[in-house]
Image: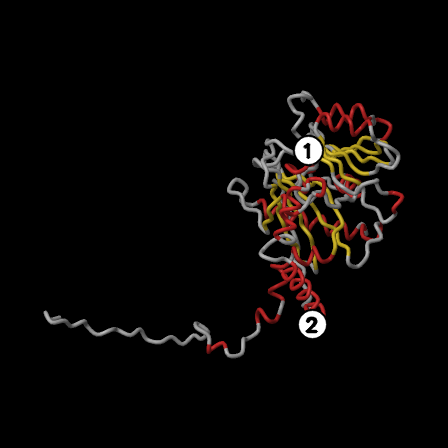
């Protein structure tokens, strides 16, 4: 397992107007949710029945795979990408204008991250790799690949729909046949999760504070029903999955630390490569990194997306809340509250109970 060293950076205290903005975001989020519902209890019930509305915008930053490939070749300590950085990536094919542009994969020989050029790419070899020896009928309800459209500030460079797609063997074959010039994004091999339900971990950074959120789908991955509803986490409506701010698993006691360390290291690399400027991101847009723990315990980097500042602030709630002076300053009149002072009364011993029969 790789050892990643992260240098601690002093975090500047929040200014009063910044703290007020963060409080406002928290208050609006709590005020808009009634009875712990995602929207309202009535609208939540309607959403569960409306399967065609479960998709949400989910576009990936395709340039990050090129960055990882170049980054992996600059390290001479070990050829293994996972040993150097603590995570791996699944087979990922970048599609540009309906044609395969680059194929990123991990070498079986030494674990290095390799890339096939466009001259050695074909949709037939892509389908053969992602499908493998799966039988179309036996695996018609199981995911084998994921389609993620490309994120871009230019409308003409984006795909017709900004939604992720989970593809079975038959679905992948049909999707490849329907690729057109206006399709740009990635086709990625589906990583089996560590558990009976699909899960995904998202990390974001706000003011040098890295926060983790883990979503686990509420349905069984091997169950029946709609494939998207069984697989979606951050790609779909919030009601399809449960969320946690920690990663806890007795089989992987150090996985949370590994995810946070890998995320911070990758974020520093994104800053060095000026990815935000390359994508023309605004001041209120942030890069979110998505990781997944596979069935064999290996950590995989899945994709990076662009999220709003509101989502980032809500995810870093537990890190930012202690920077609020109202959480740390002295509370006026605290001594009047039960337990608000260090002075304790001596316990009173009640007198012995007397009765007609004596003590």
Q: Choose between 210 and 221: the one closer to the eye.
A: 221
Q: Choose between 143 and 192: the one closer to the eye.
A: 143
Q: CA distance from mark 1 to mark 2?
A: 45 Å
**Picture disc at residue 16:** 2
Query: Which residue corresponds to the image point at 82% horizontal and 35% vertical from the top-left?
Result: 95
Image quadrant holding the N terminus, namely top right
- Figure check: 2 above or below 127: below
Compared across the picture, whether 296 is left or right of 103 comes to left
| Tags 1 and 2 touching, CB below 8 Å | no
Disc 1, SS: loop
The residue identified by callout 1 is 190
- Figure check: 336 above or below 310: below
Query: Which residue corresponds to the image point at 56% horizontal and 45% vertical from the top-left?
Result: 254
Q: How many marks?
A: 2
- Figure check: 132 above or below 204: above
The image shows residue 331 at horizontal and vertical percentages of 54, 75
Compared across the picture, whether 338 is left or right of 14 comes to left
Q: Residues within 10 Å of mark 2 (few under 14, many from 20)?
A: few
**Picture disc at residue 52:** none
Query: Which residue corresponds to the image point at 72% horizontal and 35% vertical from the top-left?
Result: 146
Q: Residues within 10 Å of mark 1 (few under 14, many from 20)?
A: many
Q: Choose between 263 and 111: the one closer to the eye.
A: 263
Image quadrant holding the C terminus, namely bottom left
Disc 2, SS: helix
Sequence-first disc among 1 and 2:
2
Q: Quadrant of residue 116?
A: top right
The image shows residue 167 at horizontal and vertical percentages of 72, 31
Q: Choose between 242 and 107: the one closer to the eye.
A: 242
């Amino acid at each position: 397992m790789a050892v990643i060293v992260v240098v601690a950076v002093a975090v500047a205290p929040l200014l009063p107007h910044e703290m007020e903005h963060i409080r406002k975001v928290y208050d609006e989020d709590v005020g808009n949710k009634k009875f712990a519902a995602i929207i309202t209890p009535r609208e939540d019930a309607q959403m569960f029945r409306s399967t065609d509305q479960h998709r949400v915008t989910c576009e990936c930053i395709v340039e990050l795979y090129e960055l990882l490939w170049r980054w992996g070749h600059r390290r001479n300590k070990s050829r293994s990408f996972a040993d150097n950085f603590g995570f791996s990536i699944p087979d990922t094919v970048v599609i540009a204008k309906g044609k395969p542009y680059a194929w990123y994969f991990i070498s079986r020989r030494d674990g290095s991250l390799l890339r096939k050029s466009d001259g050695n790419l074909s949709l037939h070899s892509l389908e053969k790799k992602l499908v493998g020896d799966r039988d179309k009928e036996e695996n018609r309800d199981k995911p084998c690949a994921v389609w993620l459209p490309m994120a871009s500030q230019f409308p003409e460079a984006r795909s017709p729909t900004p939604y992720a797609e989970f593809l079975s063997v038959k679905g992948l074959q049909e999707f490849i046949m329907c690729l057109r010039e206006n399709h740009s994004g990635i086709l990625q091999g589906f990583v089996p999760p560590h558990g009976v339900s699909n899960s995904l971990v998202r990390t974001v950074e706000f003011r040098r504070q890295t926060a983790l959120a883990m979503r686990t789908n509420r349905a069984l991955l091997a169950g029946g029903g709609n494939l998207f509803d069984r697989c979606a986490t951050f790609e779909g409506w919030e009601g399809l999955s449960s969320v946690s701010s920690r990663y806890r698993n007795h089989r992987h006691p150090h996985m949370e630390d590994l995810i946070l360390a890998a995320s911070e290291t990758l974020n520093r690399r994104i800053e060095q490569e000026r990815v935000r400027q390359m994508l023309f991101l605004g001041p209120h847009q942030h890069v979110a990194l998505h990781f997944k723990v596979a069935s064999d315990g290996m950590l995989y980097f899945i994709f990076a997306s662009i999220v709003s500042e509101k989502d980032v602030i809500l995810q870093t709630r537990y890190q930012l809340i202690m920077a609020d002076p109202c959480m740390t300053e002295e509370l006026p009149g605290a001594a009047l509250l039960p337990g608000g002072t260090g002075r304790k009364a001596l316990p009173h011993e009640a007198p012995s109970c007397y009765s007609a029969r004596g003590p």
